[in-house]
Each structure stands twice: as C-alpha cells, then as structure tokens.
Image (cartoon, rainbow, N blue to C red):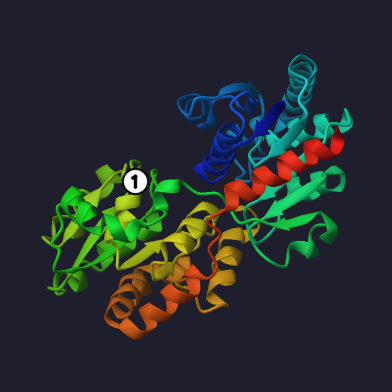
Amino acid sequence: MNIIISAGGTGGHIFPAVAVADELKRRDPSVNILFVGAEGKMEMERVPKAGYAIEGLWIAGLQRRLTLRNLWLNLQLPIKLVSSMLKVRRILNDFKPDIAVGFGGFASGPTLRAAANKNIPTILQEQNSYAGVTNKLLAQKAAKICVAYEGLDKFFPADKLVLTGNPVRSDILAIKAKRTEGVNYFGLDPHKKTIAILGGSLGAKTLNVAMETSAALIKDQSNVQILWQCGRLYEEDFKNGQAAQLPNVQMRPFIDRMDLAYAVADVIVARAGALTISELCLAGTPSVLVPSPNVAEDHQTKNAMALVNKKAALLVRDVEASEKMIPTALELIANTSLSADLSQNILSLGKPNAAKDIADVILATIQKRT
C-alpha cells in the first residue's frame, strides 16, 4: 500500500499530517508513505526528522504585499506551477500511490490536482472553520473531506464531509498529571496561578507588545506568574524590556515541551491557528484568543469565533490587544466560575481520536477502490 501525503508551510499543516502517518504506520508497518512539500519550507526538515521520506516542489504562494521583490516572485508563479506539475507527475508515475492526502500548504494544490487527473483517489483535510481557496478548488474531485468544524457544507459537498477534528501531538493528552513536572521544568512557583502567553516558535509581535505595555499591571500581581513564549524572531527586541525583567515573568524564545506549558497554565493566551485551537480543546484550559489578522481570509478570527459562540473561549481583537489582552487574562484567572465554564465547554469540542478517524477514512477509501 502506497500513500502520498502533501503538507507543509506551517506546523499547523505538518504536525497533523505526521500524526496521521504515524497512525497508518502503527496499523500497518509495511505501508509506504511519501510526503510531498515545498522546497525551502519547514516540512523539508521536520518530515525527515519524523522518519518519513519527502520530495520537494519548486512552488510558492501568491505574495499579497506590493513590493518589487514580491512582484518578481508572483511573476514566477506560472513557471513554478508548471515545474511542480511536471515533477508531481513523475513522482506519481514512480511511486504509484493508492491514494493522495492533502493537509494544506503550497504543495498540496499541484499534488492532489495531478493525482485526481490520474484517477487516484484524493482526500482533503481542512483544518480551519473557513475553507481555503485551494481546498475549495480540489473538493470537486476529492473522495472525502475531513473537517475540524461543523458547518463547512457551505463550502464543500455535504456528502463528502467527515467531522474528524484536527490531529494533535499525543503528549497534549492527559496533561493535568504533568503539572508538578511542568512547574519543576520551568522553575515556577507551585503556589501561584500561571498565565501562559504562547506566541508560537517564531513569535507574535502583538502579544509581545501587549506584554510590554502591561508591565506595570503585571508587576502588581503578587499571586500570578507568566510564562511568556516570545518567539525567536523577537527575543532581542523584548529581552531587555520592563516585562522580561519582572520577577513573576519568565520570557523564553522557544518552548520545547509544549505539553508541560499546557500542564502548568491556568489560563492560556494565544493566536487562533487551527492546531492551537485543537490543542486547547484537548487541554481544556481557559483561553483568551487573539486572532492574527495577517492570514488569508481572516480565518483565525473565524476559528476563534467558533469557540466564542459556544462560550468556550474569550476573544481579544488584535488591534485591542495592547489595552485588553493582559487585563482580560487576569480577570479570567480571578474568575473561577467563568474559568470552569470555559474549560468544560472547550473540552466538549475536543476530538482526541482525530488521527485514528482520518486514518479510517484513508483506508476505507483505498479499500473501496480495490
């Protein structure tokens, strides 16, 4: 059995894809899995580290900012697309996949389009509550579309939808038992409430600026401590600021044990990417979401609102973060009744078996073909 998986660009695409690949390998160690990604993107490093082969395409997305460099990159797009389609056809001819599965990223478009053109079954995994342009185009020929949110029948054929959720790292499960380990790992005070500011491995400038502008307020919180992931891009900008110097703040450019960060957090402040949302639903931590406005079709706001509308999280808009982010988090950590309600509601949305369910869809589709 040969399976092609195309995913990349961000961890939100790569981690779910690897989780499903691991599940498929667990069920049948003889299965052959080949990833297809975009040259120069993080998947070309992360996927081999996870133990899988990957082929890279010369492909990129449309650059929306109007600069001379971006104009030149956009002019190259037709050439890159033709080059990618030719390479994908060679990959398909050599590997002879039984199915192609797309988890998003620049390479998914040409990979699944070429597979569909050769009558190879294709499956899409849409991680967000608002469908991306590429998946909308690929949906017509897809056998099934695995989704993480209800209501996506307004974008896709209803008979193709399977509500699976987004696969996440298995270490996010059962985190409450790791709290003591997490407190010791980060050197935190076990008697204080903890807010985790999770801006991602690269960082989120808005979240960092909000921390700095709220330094005086944070200083006055004798019973609260903050674990602040500022991101590698912003460490130099903020490490000497007022917030980073506070005794009840730990600023780290990168957190390699995210499971322990979830374990120690009484409240989490984060962006609203698909993977983050899925992890929060399994962790059950009361959360303040600050959606990034710098994403296609503002899908992070739509992700966040899917939780807010079910009273499963609070929302602070990006433009209001400097003023409202930290005060909202502090109010939440003090309001034990609201925290308990948010925790219960967000846990009800979790899909802990997402990787297994998507693997079921893949294997059933292959079996149906044979």
Q: Which residue is mark 1?
A: 231
Q: Is residue 6 rendered to the left or right of residue 78?
A: left
Q: Is residue 319 left or right of residue 61?
A: left
Q: Is residue 62 visible?
A: yes
Residue 197, horizontal then vertical, whole percent? 33, 59
Q: Does 327 appear above or below 124? A: below
Residue 280 image offset from top left, x and y in percent? 45, 61
Would residue 208 be seen by someone viewing this image from the given angle?
no
The residue that appears at 20% across and 57% down in the rendered structure is: 180
Q: Tell me the quadrant of the picture where the C terminus can be found.
A: top right
Residue at 21% across / 52% down in the picture?
A: 181
Q: Nearer the viewer, residue 346 or 249?
A: 346
What is the quadrant of the N terminus in the image? top right
Quick check: 293 left or right of 270?
right
Where is residue 184 drawn, in percent x and y? 16, 52
Left or right for 302, reference 206: right
Nearer to the camera, 158 or 60: 158
Residue 335 is drawn in which quadrant? bottom left
Does residue 170 sit above or below 328 in this rendering? Answer: above
At 36% from the left and 55% from the top, the residue drawn is: 198
In-front residue for pair 98/66: 98
Q: Quadrant of residue 298?
A: bottom right
Secondary structure of the residue carrying numbered label 1: loop
Q: Quick check: 274 above or below 32?
A: below
> Residue 49 in the image: x percent, y percent?
45, 26
Residues 99 and 289: in front is 99
Amino acid carrying mark 1 in the image: Gly
